[in-house]
Image (cartoon, helix red, strand yellow):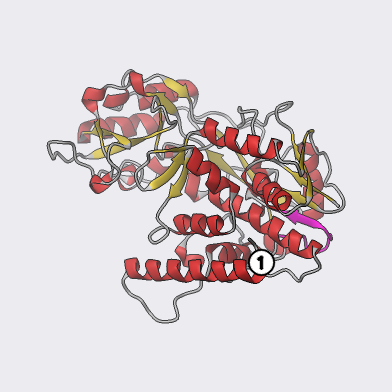
Amino acid sequence: MKIKVVGAGLAGSEAAYFLAERGEEVELWDIKPKKFTPAHKNPGFCELVCSNSLKGADPYSNACGLLKEEMRILGSLTMEAAEFARVPAGGALAVDREKFSYFVTQKLRSHKNIKTVCKEARTVPGGWCIIATGPLTCGRLSNDISGICGGQLHFYDASAPIVSRQSLNLNKCFYGDRYGKGGDDYINCPLTKEEYENFITALLSAERAELHEFDKREIFEGCMPVEVMAARGRDSLRFAMLKPVGLKDKDGNKFYAVLQLRKENAAGDAYNLVGFQTNLKFSEQKRVFSMIPALQNAEFLRYGVMHRNTFINSPQCLNADFSHKTRAGLYFAGQITGVEGYVESAASGILAALHLYQKLKGNVPSVPGDDTVMGALSAYISSPNANFQPMNANFGILRTPETLIKDKKRRYAYLAERAVKSIKEYRQKLNLY
């Protein structure tokens, strides 16, 4: 029996690979390279649009790091690709976007059980199907999904600019990560108080790009444009993306504010402005961001953009196994379900495929426990919620420890150990080897 997976982003790629590896015939549909959404440029699968970072790598101090470990245990293609394309990023897992996409694309196109179809799906297919078309689902398909799911919501997402390393003023910046961690993975661009104040003034008055094609402007906190954050208070950036805490140059100097630049590729010739998602006009990005001393002559390889993120009201229409409540054989995965972030989207692709596979084999779907990040996200997208909004991986959504642990570091370590043990038991229970 052939299973259709619509969308070859992180979630769809994981879903297709999981099923194909278990002997199922998969048709993987994607509109690229014949057609692109406003945010996509790479003709390959698994294109990372907003950032090249998959967030924290340590499973014992970071919930997204823990989610990665759970995914590795279940055989994640995304984690395999990330190791192949990894670039230095201190405590984060960041990748060379081109290499990452290439690895996944080659894996899927060469798989004997996967047929790739370059075609736009305009309606939700019948039979066994996983919809993983992401936050920029196209017109007719979007309308069909809306009809099946009783309406859609959307908010705005934004990406940060990328600059050429060669164009930086290296006399005005220094290498290093916070508290001396990560070696020379980041380039730090300090500002004095006067420079910071002038930058904020220019940022607050800068002209933003028009978004005429959309009706609403609901901004998700996790991807808030830098200019929106600045409008909350002149010092707001100093406690967010420009915080100087833990950053000193080689002479031990501290600074009023610091912008960090992170490697965009393995070659280290392109860097993105960490936390500088923006909806400013391109000319304004050049003018305002160049006020930061290290960027005074910066060459912008890509400007930041803002785009719509679409998601369904999952608690009303999805079960915890990512299946539709009333349409048999239909599953959803990725950001369209209301999980937010690269890693979370990929994880939901594994889960949707895993549950579909169990159903095909005549088994009752078994969802990971809420003591795991994967299980907690499954519970979040399916539990009643009158004000449903996208959710990132975080320790707060996991079941609380059986005993009170006041120390945060010890509590996170306990939650991580418990989750890893639980997901391994889950894998063994379902015989997922």
Rendering quarter of residue 381: bottom right
Tag 1: amino acid: Asn
User: Can residue 88 be seen here?
Assistant: yes
Question: Would you say the magenta stretch is mainly helix, strand or loop?
Answer: loop
Residue 219 in view, yes or no: no
On the image, the x and y values in percent for residue 171 come to 21, 23
The residue shown at (64%, 55%) is 350
* Circle 1 residue: 431
Quadrant location, the C terminus: bottom right
Give the x, y percent position of residue 254: 17, 41
Magenta region: 322-332
As rendered, which of 55 and 265 lies closer to the eye?
Answer: 265
| CA neighbours of label 1 inside 10 A, class few (<14), some (14 to 19), many (20+) | few
Q: Is residue 246 left or right of residue 26?
A: left
- The picture quadrant where one finds residue 289 is top left
Judged left or right of residue 338, residue 316 is right
Q: Nearer the viewer, residue 289 or 37?
A: 37
Disc 1 is placed on an element classified as loop
Residue shown at 73%/68% (left/top)?
A: 365
Q: Position of residue 391 (x, y in %)?
A: 55, 56
Would you say residue 246 sits in the magenta stretch? no
Percent of width and height locating residue 18: 68, 52
- Would residue 48 be found to the left or right of residue 403 on screen? right
Q: Residue at x 82, y 58 (%)?
A: 329
Res. 104 image quadrant: top right
| Depth check, front residue: 294 or 86 | 86
